[in-house]
Image: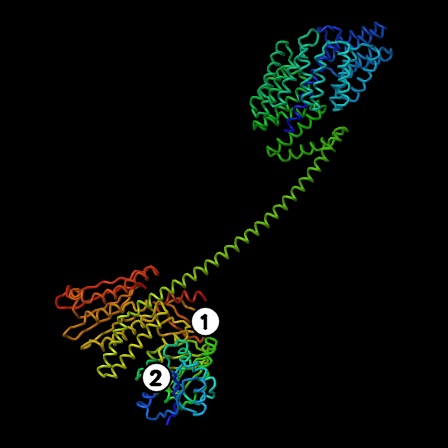
Amino acid sequence: MHLFKSFLFKLGLATLVNLLFAGQIVFAQSFDFPDSLEAELAAAQLTKHLSETNDSLQTIDLLYNYSVYLDEKGDLEGSTLYMEKALSTAVAIQDNRQIARVGNYLATNYLMLGQVDISITTYNLALKHAEQTNDYSEIAKISMNLAENYNFIGDYKNAIKFGLNSLKIKESEQDWERICYHYMAMSNIFKETGDLDKREEYILLAYQMKDKHDCSVPSDVAKIYNGLGGVAQQRSQYKKALAYYDTLKVYCEEHDFAQGINTALTNSALIYQEQQNYEKALDLILESEKYAHETPYDTIFADNCKTELYRSLNEPEKALELAMKNFRRHELVFYSAEHLKCLEFLYEINFQLKNYQDAYRWNDSLWIYRDSLSNQGVRTAIADLEMQYQTEKKEQQIALLQAENRIEQQKKLVYIAISLVLLLLVVIGTLLYFKNKRENQIHRLELRQQLLRSQMNPHFLFNALGSIQNFMYKNETKKAATYLGNFARLTRSILEHSAEEQIMLCDEIDLLKNYLELEKMRAKGGFNYRIQIADEMDTEFVKIPPMLIQPFVENAVKHGLRNINYPGELLLAFSETEDELHVTVKDNGHGIGKTTGKKNQNKSHRSMSMEIFKERQAIMLRRYKKQIQFIVSDLSMASPREKGTEVKLTIPL
Amino acid sequence: MIRTVIIEDEIHLREINRMLLTENFPDVEIVGEAGRVEDAVELIKSEKPQLVLCDIELENGNCFQVLQKCRPYNFRPVFITAFNQYAIKAIKFSAIDYILKPVNEFEFCDAIQRAIDSMPEKNSQQQTENLLAHANYGKANKKVVLRTADAMHLVDVNDIIYCKSDNSYTTFFLHDKKEVTVSKSIKEFAELFSDYNFLRPHQSFLVNLNAITKIDKTDGGFIIMNNGAEVPISSRRKQLIFEQLDKL
């Protein structure tokens, strides 16, 4: 944005200078010099005329006219040389009017040559002498030119002072000749001071006067449109601005005013550039070149514009070519801003093209050139900028430090937050753990009670006590004592194991043995039992829930082997596969078919026994996700020669 | 005659004990009975019995309180208990005889007979001290009494490298290259040492975890003990054993 602004400023300057120049021609030129004469002819004629006359005034006129002729031919230095001669002649005869007239023209030339100091001195001289003449129009004119000069060097205080002085004279003398030019000059000063409202105010004053007789020349009107466009542009009313520039272009075309067309196109191009429509901008710049005055500044400015646009259009090679072309122009040294711009382009484009060595060299040149801008104003500006830069840098550093501090604090906060969260998690975890543990304990306790309840079959308990009582009645003391001992042993092991959820299979087998011994003593006629354990089976390693098999053994004894008239046999067989224990409880009794036939009789006990088993089965499933299965079959179903019941129990390990 | 006292707080059970003793052991002379701790101490000190039949739970305390005050132990104790796993463990550690209530005549006679038989060994002092140490300090006491047919060994549990079972006999392999064979099943010792870092890699072996040098996982798996012995790992237990060993 800053880059663009400086462009705008320079464009403004370009227009200003050009239009000023154009205006001045109208002002200064009062003598028609034949166009057809060749330069040599004119010079010879001048020499001849000069030798023929002794009249200083005539000499001054001759020199003045020849100088203007040279100026129009583009030989600014030659023009200046002859104008200087004219001025010294005028000063020699102390003719105020001539000094004012010649001084005004010469000062403008100096300005064009970039010799601002001399230009100002010369304007001041001209103004001083003009004021002696009471030629108010001349005074106002010189005063305004001086104002513009001050404006040019950035001395706005003096610019406004001399500008207002000029307008005051014009208005008080009711001198409306080219008042529009003056208003526009004033508006230009406010343009440079950045006072947009004042600028617009003077443009509008000029606009109101433009159609009145003698108040303007076409170049002034062109300036008005350009100014209106500029104001709109600055207010970002781009459509409006483009419309004004278009009006300017049409107006200039009507009046065959090439410089105006050029300005209109260039300024439109800058708007398109700002809107990043680089193609359109480039088209306009290229078109504008057709109307260019071919002044070195215009060419250099246009080429810098094009360079920028080609860069934006991603054609760095073309941009580089243009920049190099611009750099080779010897006039470039007069326009410091464009010079700087050109060097910047050369550096940046080379860098972009990865010509690092060249880029390095250009960067060097750039810095040397920047340093060489020894103008006091520039120095001050640089110093100011430097100061501003340093301040900004410090502020940035402070901001950076603050940011770092903030980040540190944030980091700390984050650490603290993380620690807190972790702590919280640990606390929650611990609480959950203990809660879980407690729940588990409660659950375990419940389970244990359930197991105990299911193990201590009350029927068995009381039946056993009843058996002891029976032995006592029959006076079979020894039997009673043995039975009691066995019963006690069984109860003890049940109690011992009740604390455990799982016991070793060997312990369970001992328990079953114990139980069978008891039942054997009690049963009428007794029965035989066998316990088969598969070879290689590790009964200490296999663990099962206690008293899980007992209900099936109890069923076999109480129902299968009851009331039979032949020796009862009971087989208890254990075998294992990878993850299952297989238990077979087989008797040679009534068989399940007949047993179920008598079902009603023994209903209460059977259901009790099975209910207990079912309950444990459910607990096992819930707790270990293991399903204990059993298959009951009547052996007579398979083979008529056999009888009895077989239960095959599968316990997952 | 074998001077015997019965310490039992339940009158009926005293009678059963007395009856069983007089019926089965004509050499036994019952010289006194007591049911309270202080009476028991008094009785033992005054009568100097050779055999003490002692219930663990007494009217106002327990038998260990009695024993505490009866040093030196010139008598052989036989304990009777209804249900006290803790005390039973202490008793087993010291290889002292015990009887469970309600008494089974056969078991009763067996226990008394063994006590009488071991009287000439005169190691009642050591055994009883070990019992008290166990009863008082639990796991902190690391001594176990191993009684063989002809001798009694007081062995530190840490000195056991491993045990090998041979049906109802168990052989202990100790650090000092001694081997002790006792007539008890390895299962009993496995239960007894359940709190002492022992591992059962095989039905016939019980190893001390602290005495393991390395685990050879090849060829079915072996545990190599620090005396160079190789203990097999049964295929059934392999997975569980490896898991347990990996945790160490």
Disc 2 designates what residue?
A: B13
Residue at disc 1, secondary structure = strand
Using the rendered view, name the quadrant where residue A262 is placed: top right
Dot 1 and dot 2 residues touching (CB under 8 Å) = no
Graded by Cα atoms within 10 Å as few (under 14), some (14 to 19) or many (20 or more), the crowding at tag 1 reads: some
Image check: A636 left or right of B45? left
Per the model, the C-alpha gap separating discs 1 and 2 is 52 Å
Image check: A114 left or right of A292? right
Foreground mark, 1 or 2?
2
What is the chain letter for disc 2? Answer: B
* Amino acid type, callout 2: Leu
Residue furthest toward the left? Answer: A640
* Amino acid type, callout 1: Thr
Nearer-N-terminus badge (1/2): 2
Using the rendered view, name the quadrant where residue A350 is placed: top right
Image quadrant containing the N terminus of chain A = top right
| B201 relative to B152, above or below | above
Image quadrant containing the C terminus of chain A = bottom left
Q: Where residue A258 sits in the image (x, y, percent)?
A: 64, 13
- Badge number at residue A570: none
Q: Where residue A103 sits in the image (x, y, percent)?
A: 80, 14
What is the number of callouts on the image?
2
Q: Where residue A596 sits in the image (x, y, percent)?
A: 17, 64
Instruction: Answer yes or no: is residue B151 visible.
Output: yes
Residue at disc 2, secondary structure = helix
Q: Are marks 1 and 2 on the same chain?
A: yes
Graded by Cα atoms within 10 Å as few (under 14), some (14 to 19) or many (20 or more), the crowding at tag 2 reads: some
Q: Is residue B76 or residue A292 the one in the foreground?
A: B76
- Badge number at residue B213: 1
Using the rendered view, name the quadrant where residue A511 is placed: bottom left
